[in-house]
Structure formats: C-alpha cells, structure tokens
Amino acid sequence: MESEPKLSPVVLEMSMLAAAVASRCPSKTHELLAALRGRGVPEGQIAEVVEEAGRISTETIARGSEMVEAVLGGESPQTCMERMARQGGASECCAVDDDCRSQSSCC
C-alpha cells in the first residue's frame, strides 16, 4: 500500500467531514468546514457532502430505534437485521455476507 498515492488533503477532509456530520460531532464538523473553506472548496461541494452524510445519519438513527424496539420486544439482533433487510430498511452492511450478521452490535 506504500506505493499507492495518498489521498489529497481535500478528499481526506471531505471524507472526515462526512464522518463528522454522520456521527453528529459539531466541533469536528466546524473544524473541517473551516479547513475546506480555507482550501477554496466550493460551497456546493461541501453542501453535497453534508447533505449525504446527514441522510446517512438520519437513516441510521431511524434504523437504530427500530432495531432497539424489536430487540427489547424479544427479537434476536440477527433476526431483526434479516427482517429489516427483507423490508428494505437495513443498510448495505446488514444486507451483505461480510460476517456482519454474526455480530450482535452490527450497524
């Protein structure tokens, strides 16, 4: 991996911004917004990243609430994830076979 080119600072900061927004971290979001604006990144590109990350955050919160209610009602986490995947409510991480289903804390 050492021979591969590193991400540009803008790409890395955009990725970090998406993670900060999705995890609802105001201080890191503020810090990264300032850095990106300082690098001259267009506001439209920043807004697009923020919008998509916000959508992921909202979907995760909704899915998490539904999962918690189902598990509190006696459903196993694995059964809950499988049911949500059939209903289209689970994210891709719960729909693929990447050892995620065997982890009770997935997604």
Image (tube, helix red, strand yellow):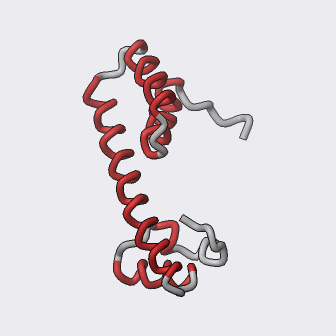
In the image, what residue occupies the spot 41% across and 24% down? 33
In the image, what residue occupies the spot 33% across and 30% down? 46
Number of disc labels? 0
Name the foreground residue: 51 vs 14.
Answer: 51
Which x, y percent locates residue 64? 46, 65
Which x, y percent locates residue 69? 45, 75
Give above or below for 75 relative to 47.
Answer: below
Give above or below for 71 relative to 45.
Answer: below
Which x, y percent locates residue 95? 48, 74
Which x, y percent locates residue 47? 29, 33
In the image, what residue occupies the spot 53% across and 24% down? 9
Name the foreground residue: 44 vs 61.
Answer: 61
- The quadrant of the image that shows the N terminus is top right
Q: Residue furthest left?
A: 44
42 lies left or right of 21? left
In the image, what residue occupies the spot 42% across and 15% down? 39
97 lies left or right of 21? right
Q: Quadrant of residue 18?
A: top left
Q: Quadrant of residue 104?
A: bottom right
41 lies left or right of 95? left
Q: Residue furthest top?
A: 38
81 lies left or right of 47? right
Q: Residue furthest front?
A: 72
Name the foreground residue: 8 vs 28.
Answer: 28
Give above or below for 8 relative to 55.
Answer: above
